[in-house]
Image (cartoon, coloured by chain):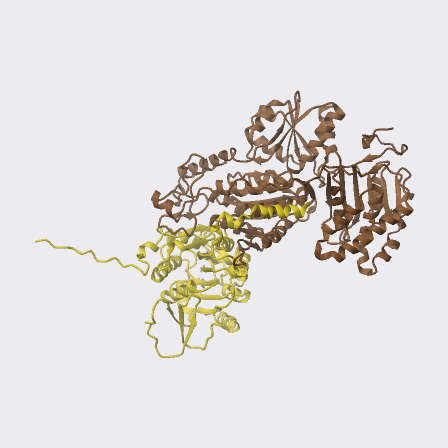
Chain colours: A brown, B yellow
Amino acid sequence: MSTLEVSPLERSFDQPGESVVNDFSIQVATVNGSGSQTANNVLLRSLFQMGIPVSGKNMFPSNIAGLPTWFTIRASKHGYIARRKEIDFLVAMNPETAREDVMKLERGAAVVYDEPLKLNLLRSDLHFYPVPFDKLVAPVCPEAKLRKLVRNMIYDGVVAWLLSIEMPEIRKALVKQFGKRKAKAADLNWGAAQAGYDWAGQNLTKTDPYRAERMNETAGKIIIDGNSACALGAMFAGVTVVTWYPITPSSSLVETLMGYMKRFRHDPETGKATYAIVQAEDELASIGMALSAGWAGARSMTSTAGPGISLMSEFIGLGYYAELPAVIFDIERVGPSTGLPTRTAQGDILKNAILSHGDTRHPMLFPASPEECFTMSIDAFDLAEQFQTPVFVMSDLDLGMNNWMADAFPYPEKSIQRGKVLSAEDLNKLGGFARYKDVDGDGVGYRTLPGTNHAAAAYFTRGSGHNEKAQYTEREDDYINNMDRLARKFESMRGYVPSPVVENRDHAKIGFVAVGSSDYAVRESCDQLRSEYKTEASYLRLKAYPFTAELTDFIRRHERVYVVDQNRDAQLLGLMRLEFEPDLIARLRSVRYYGGLPLDARTVTDEVVRQEGL
Amino acid sequence: MSTTVTPSPKKVNRIGLEVVNYKGSKTTLCAGCGHNSISERIVECFYELGVDPWRVAKFSGIGCSSKSPAYFLGLSHGFNSVHGRMPSVATGALLANRNLLGLGVTGDGDTASIGIGQFMHMVRRNVPLIYIIEDNGVYGLTKGQFSATADIGSTLKTGAPNELPPFDCCALALKWGATFVARSFSGDKKQLQTLLKAAISHKGLAVIDVVSPCVTFNDHDGSTKSYSYVTDHEEALHELDYVPYYSEITVEIPDGAVRDVELHDGSRLKIRKLDREYDPTNKLSALAALEEAEAKHEVLTGLLYVNTGKQTLLEVLNLTDEPLCNLPENKVRPLPEVLEQVMEELR
């Protein structure tokens, strides 16, 4: 028994002694509003500081306080950071769900629980660690009303002892979490963590195999959520007008942006803001402001989620026809407002591609990591101004609100691209211009901004009833001419949007196509198919719509292509169907997950195995 | 013998532009439409005051009124946007470029029906914009349905009566905190001109509700927005004269009480008393006057309220003096050191 490389599936409860190092998932089950977020983030960060690849997923209800919530931390020496279905280590703090949480565990898992819950009576094939939380919290937290919060840090201490997480890292993570100004709170929590650690050392006997051990896989990396990364991207893109309306899961994007802009975007001499952030009365107003700010020459954005996009639909259609630049962050989530607003999905892909009235096509960028949330936010602003059209940045709740390990962000290399804007001097040289004339053959006309001091600068902006000179018309030939130019403009974008990431495998007959946060599960699934089923799968991760030639080539290279969708109706696949010839469409297969949780590799693998008959 | 013909000098305003420079394309509205008169007043006012047309941005929603910005100020950018959503469009553009002089033209359907929400929030924000409601109580472009400003009991062309009470956009704007509220009539040339000029000089949102009869769908006997009805029922609050900041006072002021209101740009409004004592800086009396007028079926016109002290949205946001749209890259993209500092905080 010397190997440490035992797959969790093959482990047996009856064979103690085999350590499983840096390859486990911890689930903390608590009650929403109980303040467990700090304890969970400290745990996550401590593992990260020990150099172990980690990811954290918060599964929370649409509620302020009282409903159950689960936080899952996955440590993976292989660097897998997708959600894992199987839980190895449960911290059961919620009496309401404790029974079900325990019954769901795989044999051999470990359970830390509040002693009075007597969870050990439920099963005999798990490692149980009862902890008298109430007894432990009183001495370390004299103030009774804080005990509910501080209690959570006790499980951090217990878990640290059980998993060999280094206590100085817990301390460091706490200081990081609370910052210098809240040193007192950090001290109080540190006392609780220590009490948990000491009590566990004196009273528990470790029987489970899971252990953390220092690695060197996180040096230089950061921990950040996708929304904060988008916010930083927007700030470094030079955004000047931000208009928004609160909606889960996108609100934290603009809230984080406000914090950064306050720190870094006030004129050092005058103290005045080099930006405007306005919380609008609804999404119709927020998109109206963003589009017209773009019309008037600002770098503008809004941030929302599916139900907000529905409300913005009319304006975004006008944005397409009137050719107005703006960036729309869509942090996708499940269903209507009374759907599952705190659960993740990729449910807006098809809708956004053809949003609104008449014939429309909208570009979308699909970041899959915080680094890409940063870089693609910058790309999106450039794209919007270069192509004078609304651009979607398609994130989702999993990417946007969960904490991810990421490489430090690169400072933008390109300068800000403002697109074809004519100044008064340009107009002097040219004598005049036709707003909607395709001068360069790329479908993109030249525009002027209101306020341009020139007699030839003004034009009248309206929807589609205009000729090349922006004059009112309802003529058939003018309308068709304009529509064809808009189509040409969309074609031109194919050369500008970020290219997909392609990993072709030799002799692979099958391939995956996915976008955004599906990336982690799909990559892990490729490894599962190889190691468990001796099946090679290539993988193309799309970064943008319109699709580029690489996608066509990829489909041609493979007999069957599995398009991974985090929605019921295979929206990404549907969008591909709109573009491709029947022979290519015939190669497309669908893998769909729509349960509201972050996609896991096993779900993908099992579906491919089923369809392939492996 | 030769004769030298000296061309008569073209008449220009103080910035050297002719009145034709303030005109737009030919109107496509019905002959006799009140909106056309309002367009003419706009042309006259901007010409007479010598406003740089390139500094003006025109905004409108959807409807007959909202088509009209194409018919004036052809040297100004214009944006014919979405039904009921012009306030957000104007707001966004003015955030982007604080140097623009915003001129919004809307209708009663656009403002009081589909757009009441955005109207309300624009008032709340005190967006620096001239907001003209061309109010005829009826939808013209869709051929004559009632809007939310139609009076109870007034009838459609078909004779069908309106059974719901109207919104009074002036009273609502007052209640929500508007800083300049006026009502006028498209047929009252002098009053409308004076109010428009005062609105140009106002800092903040200027709401002017102009009763503007629809000759095609709402100019019949059962209408309370017809030319004859408004002519018979108009009750002017006062006589108004506007004195621009750049000229010496040349207006002859007849006898009687005159109240002088200094506007933001230094121009002055001379308010002469008619039948009643009226203080246009008193919000409560403005609301009371509107209530009384409604009870007496009068169309009360004039400057209902003005407050020159309130901060605009742009001031609340503490924006840089340089318009946001003109800021160079080094003002909007923080330095690499900032990114490194943020990354370090996240490590």
Q: Quadrant of residue B256 in the image?
A: bottom left
**Foreground: A181 or A529?**
A181
Q: Disc count in the image?
A: 0
**Foreground: B183 or B225?**
B183
Answer with left or right where residue A332 lies relative to residue B328. right
Q: Quadrant of residue A377 in the image?
A: top right
Q: Quadrant of residue A206 in the image?
A: top right
Residue at the limit of the structure toward the top, as seen here: A507
In x, y percent, where is residue A298? Answer: 50, 49
Answer with left or right where residue B8 lies relative to residue B319. left
Residue drawn 81% across and 55% down? Answer: A148
In x, y percent, where is residue A362? Answer: 54, 39
Q: Is residue A107 above or below residue B315?
A: above
Residue A191 visible in the current orientation: yes
Residue A356 visible in the current orientation: no
Q: Is residue B304 above or below residue B66?
A: below
Answer with left or right where residue B110 lies relative to residue A200. left
In x, y percent, where is residue A209? Answer: 85, 36
**Foreground: A265 or A370?**
A265
Image quadrant holding the C terminus of chain B, namely top right
Residue at the limit of the structure toward the left, as seen here: B1
In x, y percent, where is residue B57? Answer: 43, 54
